[in-house]
Image (cartoon, coloured by chain):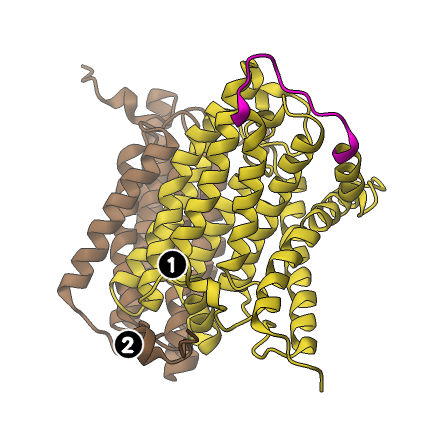
Chain colours: A brown, B yellow
Amino acid sequence: MNLALTDPALTGTVQAPGVYEGVANVIAAAMLLIEFGMLRQALARDQIRLYAAQSALLSVLAIVIAADRNLPDLYALAALSAGLKVVAVPLVLRRLLGRPGAGSAPDEDEPAGVAGSQTLSPASAVLAGIVLAAYGFFCAGALGIHGPAAPATALAIAAAMVLVAFGLMIVRRDVASQAIGFFSLENAISLAALVVAAGLPLILETAFLFDLLVAVVVFGMLIRAHHTKAESLSTADLTRLRG
Amino acid sequence: MSAALPIPVIQLLQVLTVAVAAPGVTGVIAKVEARLQGRRGPRIAQPYYDLAKLFRKEALAPEGASWFFLAAPLIAVTCYLTIPLLIPVLTSYGLPLGYMGDILGGGFLLSLASFVVATAALETGSPYAQLGSSRAKTFSAIAEPVVLFVVFTVALLTGTDLPYALAATVRSSAGQVIRPAHLLAAAALFMVILHETGRIPVETHTGTNEFGMIEEARAFEHSGPYFALLRWGGQLKQLILFTILADVFLAPWGLASTQRAADIGLAIVALLAKAVAVGCAVAVIDNSFAKLRLFKITEFVSGAFLLAVLGVFTLYLGGG
């Protein structure tokens, strides 16, 4: 009765892809989980914190790929992206959201309209997110792209993240969450870029990063403009045409 | 060199270890929890004294309750004592009775135990016991898909659904440990264990407020030795779930690979150390989170479901 259970040929084990691929996949999966965290997070402040954590994981992944695949450019990219997305963008966002209601104290930076902006209950939102993620996974699996740098699973996770970020922007009715959803969408695309084209010239990668800055400025303007006009961050006020 | 133990003795030792150590693990968790709250806490052996006291007390059954009311605790404990035969408790090689049932078989036994206790609670006519069993069944129905997806992950990882096979797979290389599917499934299982053992995000373990009770409320009408059996059954269930988490998923190291008495003894110590480590993690969680409102439990379970489903997805693409 004592089967030789350690023999993988006998048990039909799915071969483990190796430690490097495992680490890369785990980091990518953690980023996807953070994306889901944003989906159910009620406070804008915590969403910003999650975004910073997700960006930090992206930098860690860049460092892992740089160390394993011997691509020194990626160290610079990781540092740049950490500085921009872990420090600068969350800071700007926090200041933007802290601004409305000019007289409010810095810790009362919780604008109205973020907490109650879910159109779905958190559990349903997560289930909808799972469906979106499944679609992303199977699309990426069907494409069969194999990058030289990181494993295919990470690419599939990136595709799922893009869709879940879209979902986040759809199910929330406030500009702040939509901005966060957009920025995390950029994180997902950076993840896919790391997987498929880690050896891209540094100058191109940097240019993409600065695109994010443009997006931050544009979203900042939108949030401010919407807040001054509608006195709330909720986009529910935008459904009716006003003369 | 120490003598080799015969296989049936080892098989019996698996059951005995779990049966004897279960109240002790509960005692350690209570102690750690108290220390974290700045209290001195009850002594670690307190659950044993409680059981001994209850076994000496008189047993009463509510009027109109049938024989099933008194049989249920016995059936439940029998189920709990059968499961250690099926999972790797002390040995890394499968014992003869270990192939009697797979992970699903163990799951069926756990559900059967929970079902008979819930039915006995319905027999009593007591509103709180009935409320507790109704809630317990509702929420375990929600948690069931999570368990299924964890089992799917195991099946995809090993090609079987034997707990021994997964433990052997995890031991085989570092790449098997650091892969999203394995880590996600283990995390999902841990959340299910918090749910099943009535720990803090789901239920206050030591509370006396009936309205928040789920599992705890079911034993309200039992008394004396029968109540002791139910308490002991809950402790057994907790240790069994901790053993599955530690010996199958997280740390299947330290199990005996031979029949020598010294190795088996070491495996017993290792098992207890692992169970206490998991218990400490549970105690820390108990102290750092608030109990969820009843209708927020679905959110907690949907989180566990998310982890388990993503584990299967990453595997399904190969690699993961």
Q: Which residue is mark 2?
A: A201
Compared with residue B251, is residue A239 higher up or lower down, i.e. above or below? above
Of residues A40 and A181, the one nearer the viewer is A40
Is the residue B87 above or below the residue B148 in the image?
A: below
Residue A100 visible in the displayed image = no
Residue behind mark 1: A29
- In the picture, measured across the screen, residue A162 lies left or right of residue A99, that is left
Image quadrant in which you'd find residue B17:
bottom right
Image quadrant in which you'd find residue B183: bottom left
Q: Residue at x 62, y 44 (%)?
A: B285
Which residue extends farthest front? B67
Disc 2 versus disc 1: nearer the observer: 1
| SS under mark 1 | helix
User: Is B41 above or below relative to A120?
Assistant: below
Residue B37, percent from left and from top:
77, 40
Instruction: Give whichever of discs 2 and 1 has the lower sequence position.
Output: 1
